[in-house]
Image (cartoon, grey):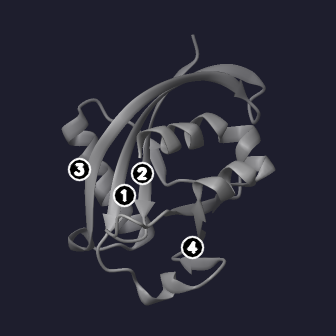
Amino acid sequence: MNRRASSLIAVKDGVDALSNRYLTYYDEQWNCWFLPNHRSFDSYEEDKRKLSSYLSSEFKIPSDDFQMRFVGTATSTKLSTAHNEERTYDYRLYLASVIRIPDAWDAEGEFAIGSKKCKWMTVGEMLNDRKIYAINHDVIQMLKDLI
């Protein structure tokens, strides 16, 4: 069986309970907006530690400026449009609430974080984007259900 373990990070724009936007980045290979993600590590403790480091290095968020917690898991079998084969994904979802939003992130629309093109999106905006829906409806549904 073709199985993948992937950890996803829902980076919320602040600790405010009313905040409903999540950080997405544009993946050139997939030609699609994604939540920050990384392959899963064996233990949840190692996974969380590595994901915190990934957020700090790739998205330039100092580790003191966000709080991250494990939210839940989901398994999904779907056609990988990039590989034209059915794959099973074991997802782990983490929520990272950014305490101090960098000034550059306040931009409406797209903004750059290092070499990454990013933007804030609501769950509704993700579900209404045809490309995201086609590739990652299951991920967005998990986000909607668990957070």
Contact between labelled residues 4 and 2, with CB atoms less than 8 Å apart: no
Work out whether residue 59 or residue 74 is closer to the camera in this orientation and state it.
Answer: 74
Mark 2 vs mark 4, foreground winner is 2
Q: Secondary structure at mark 1?
A: helix
Q: Quadrant of residue 17?
A: bottom left
Going by the numbered disc 1, the residue's amino acid type is Tyr
Nearer the N terminus, badge 3 or badge 1?
A: 3
In this view, 11 is above or below 127: below
Q: Secondary structure at mark 3?
A: helix
Q: Position of residue 38 (x, y in %)?
A: 45, 45
Q: Amino acid at mark 4?
A: Ser
Q: Earlier in the sequence, mark 1 or mark 4?
A: 1
Callout 4 crowding tier (Cα within 10 Å): few <14, some 14–19, many ≥20: few
On the question of residue 59 being in view, the answer is yes
Residue type, label 3: Arg
Q: For residue 43, which numbered disc appears in the image? A: none
Q: Which residue is depicted at the point 53% across and 53% down?
A: 35
Residue that mark 4 sits on = 115
